[in-house]
Image: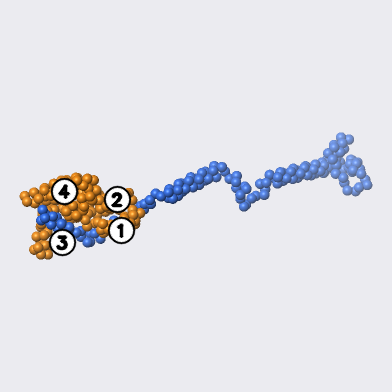
Amino acid sequence: MEQLERLLQQLRQIMPDDGYARRSRMQIIGFPVERRTRLTPWSFVMHNLQIGSAIALVALLLIVGFGGFSGWKLLSPFRIASLDVANLRAEAEAISDIQVRLDGVAYTEAPRHITSTISRTIPPGAKTTSIESAGGTEDKTPKPLTIDEALDILSQ
Amino acid sequence: MLDGEKRIIQDAVKGEASAFGLLYDHYQPQIYRFVVIKVGRREDAEDLTHHVFLSAWKNIGSYEEVGHPFSSWLYQIARNLVIDHYRAKRQEVGLQEAEEANLLGHAPSSEADMEQSLAMEKVARAIRLLSPLHQDVVIMRFVEELTVKEVGTTLKKSEGAVKVLQHRAIQKLKELLLS
């Protein structure tokens, strides 16, 4: 029995080759492994906090994306004054005034045109004097006729 | 057991390569001996031992400190890999047995060396004729001189069962060496 034990203990002299051991060690140690962190209450809280904040961020992005950019009007540093409703209304009213004034211009221009037409159709010397006298002799500058006056003259 | 092994294992579990390197340096020779006695070929033993430690390093994160020696975990990986090795190369085993395995790894320099080498190879060959479980008990108890408790932990057997196994294994080994 002792001899057998001695023989078995001799097997302990078996050793791996040094070169092999070095190469193997380098390959194993160089192999990337995922670092493992033990689960502690703090890491558990942090993990849940990370997930929660990620979900909140996604929800915020969705709200901004689907809710439009109405907040931009209030928050934007480049606010456009013309987008103000009161200003727009005032400008619209100003435009209607301009139209009224233009109508007046068209109304006063028309008799001049008619006058010149009449002067070309009526023979010279016949009615011209009466037309001119209708505007008054005191004022040398011809007074523009209205359409009604011109029609009255033509009907005579 | 390695000095400050508990702390080193904790660091290795966290992924510290240098800590695992210390464990490798300490346990690699005994795991290599365990494997080479069981498979008989240095090349196969080197390959398997490499895979034992590579597997251990890959799975170090799942290692749980439950009071068992770290070597038990390595021996369990080694045993499984040797079983897989024999399953994969069942047909080649006969040829391997016929080969002369130079367990010392270098040419004997003297006549005494030669005799010692031959004696070692004769014992190793006899061990390989034992059942896998008897092989494990003989190598762990008498080559590596692990305690009965450590062997029991590794093989998941009671101390009484280990004592019975070692007795039977030695008796069988004697018969094989005398025959």
User: Which disc is residue B166 wearing?
Assistant: 4
In contact (CB < 8 Å): disc 1 and disc 4: no
Mark 2 lies on residue: B67
Measure how far apart labels 1 and 4 are at the Cα level: 31 Å
First of labels 3, 4 by sequence position: 3
Q: Colour of chain B?
A: orange
> Which chain letter matches label 3?
B
Packing grade of label 3 (10 A; few <14, some 14-19, many >=20) is few
Q: Secondary structure at mark 1?
A: loop
> Which chain letter matches label 1?
B
Mark 1 lies on residue: B4
Q: Is residue A155 left or right of residue A2?
A: right
Give the farthest residue toward the front.
B160
> Which amino acid, by three-letter code, is at mark 1?
Gly
State the blue chain: A
- Which is in the foreground here, disc 3 or disc 2? 2
> Which amino acid, by three-letter code, is at mark 3?
His
First of labels 1, 3 by sequence position: 1
Position in image of residue B101 (x %, y %): 14, 55
Mark 3 lies on residue: B106
Measure how far apart labels 3 and 4 are at the Cα level: 31 Å
In contact (CB < 8 Å): disc 3 and disc 4: no
Q: Is residue B179 visible?
A: yes
Packing grade of label 1 (10 A; few <14, some 14-19, many >=20) is few
In contact (CB < 8 Å): disc 4 and disc 2: no
Measure how far apart labels 1 and 2 are at the Cα level: 14 Å
In contact (CB < 8 Å): disc 1 and disc 2: no
Q: Is residue A124 left or right of residue A79?
A: right
